[in-house]
Image (spheres, coloured by chain):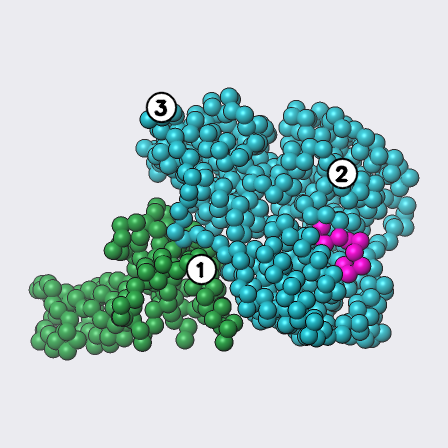
Amino acid sequence: MAQHTLSVLVENSPGVLARVASLFSRRGYNIDSLAVGPTESPEISRITIVLNLEGHALDQVSAQLFKLVNVIGIQEMEDKNSHQRELLMVKVNSAGDNRSKIEAVVGKYRASIVSQATSSLTIEAIGSSAEIAALLGELSSFGIKELVQSGLIALENGDATLAERTLQETGLASSSTHSQTEDYQN
Amino acid sequence: MASEITGAQALVNALEDSGVDVMFGIPGGAILPAYDPIFDSKIRHILVRHEQGAGHAATGYAQVTGRVGVCIATSGPGATNLVTPIADAQMDSVPIVAITGQVPSAAIGTDAFQEADIRGITMPVTKHNYLITDPAQIPRAIAEAFYIASSGRPGPVLVDIAKDALQKMTSYNYPKKLNLLGYNPQIEPNSEAIRDAASLIAQSSKPIFYIGGGVIKANAAKELLVLAELVGAPVVTTLMARGAFPDSHSQHLGMPGMHGTVAAVTGLQKADLLITLGARFDDRVTGKLSTFAPNAKIIHADIDPAEIGKNRYADVPIIGDLGPIIKALIPAVKAEFAKNKADITSWWKQMNSLRQKYPLGYNEPSDGSLSPQYVIERIGEITGPDGIYVAGVGQHQMWASQFVKYEKPRTWLNSGGLGTMGYAVPAAMGAKVGAPDTPVWAIDGDGCFQMTNQELVTCALNDIPIKVAVINNESLGMVRQWQTLFYKERYSNTDLHSKRIPDFAKLAEAMGCVGLRCESKGDVDKIIKEANAINDAPVVVDFSVHRDAMVWPMVAAGTSNDDILIAKEMAPDWDSQEL
């Protein structure tokens, strides 16, 4: 599959997002979505990147990313072992008898109506990329006036945390080093 | 509690505590506070004539000494003039630290006078960079910069410091310990990888050492010699690795790549195993990548994990410092050889036949004019393998890599990755500062020389007696060669008229150097010896050479190494070779 989700722990220092963006742009890696925010530690931020890799190996992307001095840890988030969500806000045309139909769709997707106006409803939804895409597909027949979407965020299932994994490892070797070594040991 | 000092004094103290003995720079408004304590510092500051010269000088110094080179400039144009040498150092993995002044922190982002976002500009061409607005952060940033520049895969680090941070008072603490969460280069190799590499080496009947500049960076040339002699395989050294393995050694096939020897290029193509040490499968070496070394397994040892698999899949990746890697490979290979060792005699027969049939060579111009290759060859022979040779970029660079014989690491400097014309004179200046007792020859082209020769003034005034051979073919020679080969001899904008203007010898004299001229073969030795005898001033020799000389062999850009030509439209006679 060409699409991958990477969780990247970075030092919370000025310019770090620019470094990541500059690297991706320079090396021709396509970003589908990007979300940056604080973590449990004030010194560390977390970037979740959804990448569309055509013609580039994920190992190579990780290795290049890990060369950035401010990047502390990288892990791929896979569907099977992580919880992945994105946030959608969408303003839908509610003229005529659309309103009740929209409410039915909103109920079906466990979304919510956060604002009502004379000719539109503003809907908020949280879901997986597939759920959000399906919801948007259904809403599009009513006429979408405006929409905004967050980048995807993801968290690994289970007790393990990315920070523990990264900071407790001796040598802090990059994920790519590891996968290289693993490949190599197989 | 220690008394407070200015940020500028903290900067100078931190540079001293980082072991800096020399730096190259030019003052200006934003960096001016730093120049006041520099006036009293034990660090030698060499006032250059252009910031680009400062950057390349730092690089030349670093490449010769193995220490971190330092350059310093003011904000805005001072900083942007450093961008080319910084990018150059990044491509060639040279440890330099660039210090730049920045406009006062309150003015950052206002398009203030001489403001440029040099941190943003240099992000893609530095190993790391900093913007410092708090004087208390200066010592740590400097200490980290030197550590990052010199450890792991070396590279340039820029520290941009706002003027008010230089002016404000702070207490000074040079950090004893650095805690870089995201930076910890792997030094020791994985022992299993070493064993697997050794096993592949023992099984290979057509092995070849593909040696890159990393061997020189890792100071591992001695270990390489031991390993290479143990394995007994042919060795090729890339443009960045010339000197990592003695040219006089019988196992050495020369340089691979676009202008490599037939034996080195073909050796890589026909091998069944590439023992790749500190090289990066650059396009100038591989030619068309999909046709490169098609039957070879790859052992790829490098300190930078991102080089593994970047261009070519590695069957056995080894991440770590090449010193420990080669030291670990030696006993591992011995242990494998004790069990079995494939016969490589027929492989050597092929390689020996290639190098006997296709040695490097050149034809003297038929009109009796001076051959550029001859000049360069004689400079190398007369000055000897203890000299340091610094090239610009173009034909003269390739000839200097082909016809000067290198026996020792850190005696050959050039701009390999970025291909920066104008590199030679300032880099030679830095090299001479780093190795004051060694003769340093800049072998430059007339095009390159006109880009940065102003640093000869710096050399003349600061007792830096370099020697410059201007290989004057009155054209942008390599571009002209491509026009000859690929653009039907339509010489668009490559004629520099530099046998007429400028007069290089007079220009040299005007800059406080000795200016010499050489136009005939009979004078070459005499003039080189005359230049070598001058040690109290820089010397420039204008060698007026034939303009139609070309660099051969050649693998045209984007084509396969199998299509190497030994002269125009002339391929090696493959049919007579058993390959």
Q: Which picture quadrant has residue B22?
A: top right
Compute the Cα span from label 3 to label 1: 41 Å
In the image, which disc is placed on residue B3? 3
Point 66% across, 71% down: residue: B336
- Any idea which chain is the cyan one in this picture? B
Give the percent coordinates (x, y) of residue B8: 42, 28
In the image, which disc is placed on residue B156? none
Viewer-nearest of discs 3 and 2: 3
Q: Which amino acid does label 1 sit on?
A: Ala
Crowd band around label 3 with a 10 angstrom C-alpha radius: few (<14), some (14–19), many (20+): few
In the image, which disc is placed on residue A173? 1
- What shade has chain A been given? green
Mark 3 on the same chain as mark 1: no
Q: Choose between B102 and A115: the one closer to the eye.
A: B102
Crowd band around label 2 with a 10 angstrom C-alpha radius: few (<14), some (14–19), many (20+): many
B21 vs B39: above or below: below
Task: Give the secondary structure at mark 2.
Answer: strand
Question: Which residues are drawn in magenta?
Answer: B241-252
Point 54% across, 61% down: residue: B189
A121 vs B477: above or below: below
